[in-house]
Image (tube, grey):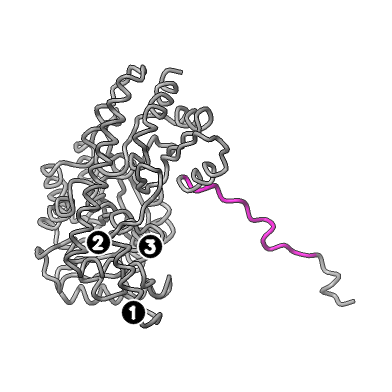
Amino acid sequence: MTESANSPKISRFGSITTAPPDAILGLTEAFVADPSPTKMNLSVGVYKDATGKTPILECVKEAERQLVGCEVTKGYLPISGVSEYCSQVGDLIFGDTIDRSRLATLQTPGGTGGLRIAAGFLASQLAPIRLWTPSPTWANHLPVFASEGVPMESYRYLSADRTSFDIEGMIDDLQSKAKPGEAVLLHACCHNPTGIDPTPEQWAEIAKVLASKHLLPVIDFAYQGFGKGLQEDTASIHAVLKENEEAIVCNSFSKNFGLYSERVGGLTLVAADDSAAKASMSQLKKVVRCNYSNPPRHGAAIVSTILGDEDLTSSWHAELAAMRDRIQQLRTQFVETMKTAGSGHDFTFLLPQNGMFSYSGLNKMQVDQLKNEHSIYIVGSGRINVAGMSENRMEQLCSAVAQVLES
């Protein structure tokens, strides 16, 4: 018998502890396991139609039909992705307001992929750089940037009563605490998790503070078209770039094209000139190469096909507008139904909110009650996915919310 056979066995993986479930996707796992016939999942940010399904847009179906007939290869894409797609990303976000030679655009696996590449770029090229994030922000923002070792601090975003934007708190934190050269994470529209956005006047003020403090805007643009409209939702980005010549914008087409599982997004670095843009692109590619190497083709090909066809683009605009309008109708229906649900609480503060999400004001205990007593799943922060509500189940939802508010 060999010496190695007599040696005590060492388990390399036996001491690994179980990671806590994802704050959002973990709720979906619990929802799936829940046997209740009346369960309701308002946690994950996906749009659902009146039947509770996440539909494939008609323009997407037609684009895929066209792609099946003309696709000739499954070869690798360039590191930066489909070139036509990257150009269309620039058109959709910036229009003709920015000299294209100043843009370095990559196709990324969803908005999260873009954020991760942005984090890697900050860590490798601008370190040490601290990132200021809104409080609250999307649950995955912090771990994504932490994964690349980017240090973070938070700035105030939500008012003390959690019903409005705290412009004074944000400005005070950035002016008094942020140091020149640091970065600031911004939500371009449809703030996640609150649905509360700055006004155009407030965006102009924020942009000037960023410029005066020489802070780098890192803009998460995951919900274009779900706020006021496709072009209207770019106003915040244009306001920021009016005062600041550099920025990083991470966009996603998961929501506005309904391409959640295709992972379609982008990262655009706005540089001061073409030389800086080219150098930055080379470093962004380097970050991509040691991460996912190059992006997948299909989702980007769908988007590019739609944006390259006038009829499909028109169809997309109409389908997106219908989703946006229905979400706002659901938000209004929730507010009106809560008035008669007997809770005595006024939810009219939800009406000015934008996008898929609304901050309900429910605390962690009330959120747990909704799950444990009513099989209604929302995020622990009190964020509700309005896009997951159903017209014909609104009374059930509002009755449950009223009960936990009064308990």
Quote the CA–CA distance across marks 3 and 1.
17 Å
Residue 277 placed where, x, y %?
20, 73
Q: Nearer the viewer, mark 2 or mark 3?
A: 3
- Which type of secondary structure does the marked residue at label 1 adopt? loop
**140 shown above or below 127:** above
- Which type of secondary structure does the marked residue at label 2 adopt? strand
Q: Nearer the viewer, mark 3 or mark 1?
A: 3
Residue at 22% across / 51% down in the picture? 225
Q: Could you tell me if the residues under marks 3 and 1 are in contact, i.e. CB atoms within 8 Å?
A: no
Point out the image quarter for the N terminus. bottom right
Residue at 53% across / 44% down in the picture? 32
Amino acid at dot 2? Ile
Sooner in the amino-acid sequence: mark 2 or mark 3: 2
Quote the CA–CA distance across marks 2 and 3.
19 Å
Report the front residue among 274 and 254. Answer: 254
Q: Kindly indicate the quadrant of the structure image that contains residue 91.
A: bottom left
Q: Which residue is mark 1?
A: 78
Sooner in the amino-acid sequence: mark 3 or mark 1: 1
Amino acid at dot 1? Pro
Q: Which residue is mark 3?
A: 263
Residue at 15% across / 41% down in the picture? 199
- Which type of secondary structure does the marked residue at label 3 adopt? loop
Q: Report the magenta stretch's main SS.
A: loop
Q: Nearer the viewer, mark 1 or mark 2?
A: 1
**145 shown above or below 296:** above
Residue 353 placed where, x, y %?
24, 37
Q: Which residues are magenta?
A: 9-23
Q: How dense is the environment of label 1, judged by Cα within 10 Å: few (below 14), some, or many (20 and up)?
A: some
Amino acid at dot 3? Arg
Report the front residue among 5 and 360. Answer: 360
Q: Which residue is mark 2?
A: 248
Sooner in the amino-acid sequence: mark 1 or mark 2: 1
